[in-house]
Amino acid sequence: MPIPVSKRVQKRREALKSAGLRPVQIWVPDTRRPGFDAECRLQSQRVAASDASDPDLANFLDLALADLNADEV
């Protein structure tokens, strides 16, 4: 006889809990919502414009990347 779904879920949750994990609920933007794509486009354009107006940003990012790569050596 198959094990009921509720028992399987309970067993799985107990295994995860005994492994030191805990459940967390995360709310994320609904990508199906009308206007989501337009809002993403608007925010991307604002970030791009902000980046373009900062002459020191590219140098800062290059230095940060070099620092990360130095840690790998």
Image (cartoon, helix red, strand yellow):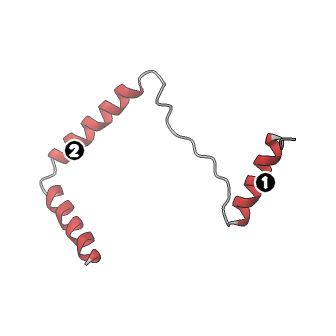
Q: Who's the residue at 15% across and 56% down the image?
A: 58
Q: Is residue 67 left or right of residue 59?
A: right
**Label 2 sits on what residue type?**
Ser
Q: Which residue is mark 2?
A: 50
SS state under label 2: helix
Q: Is residue 11 left or right of residue 51?
A: right
Residue 32 horizontal/vertical position (percent)? 48, 25
Residue 36 horizontal/vertical position (percent)? 42, 27
Question: Circle 1: is it few (<14), some (14-19), or many (20+) Cα within 10 Å?
Answer: few
Residue at the extreme bottom: 73
- Dividing the image into 4 quarters, which one contains the C terminus? bottom left
Task: For marks 1 and 2, give the one nearer the viewer.
Answer: 1
Residue at the extreme top: 34
**Label 1 sits on what residue type?**
Lys
Question: Circle 2: is it few (<14), some (14-19), or many (20+) Cα within 10 Å?
Answer: few
Q: Is residue 21 left or right of residue 44?
A: right
Q: Who's the residue at 73% across and 53% down the image?
A: 12
Judging depth in this view, the residue of 19 and 34 nearest the camera is: 19
Q: Who's the residue at 26% across and 42% down the image?
A: 47
Relative to 20, residue 39 above or below: above
Mark number for residue 2?
Answer: none
SS state under label 1: helix
Residue at the extreme front: 1
Quarter of the figure with residue 41: top left
Q: Which residue is mark 1?
A: 11
Answer with mark 1 or mark 2, whichever residue precedes in sequence.
1
Q: Who's the residue at 83% across and 41% down the image?
A: 2
- Dividing the image into 4 quarters, which one contains the N terminus? top right
Kindly report the distance in space between the C-alpha atoms of the residues bearing marks 1 and 2: 50 Å
Quarter of the figure with residue 70: bottom left
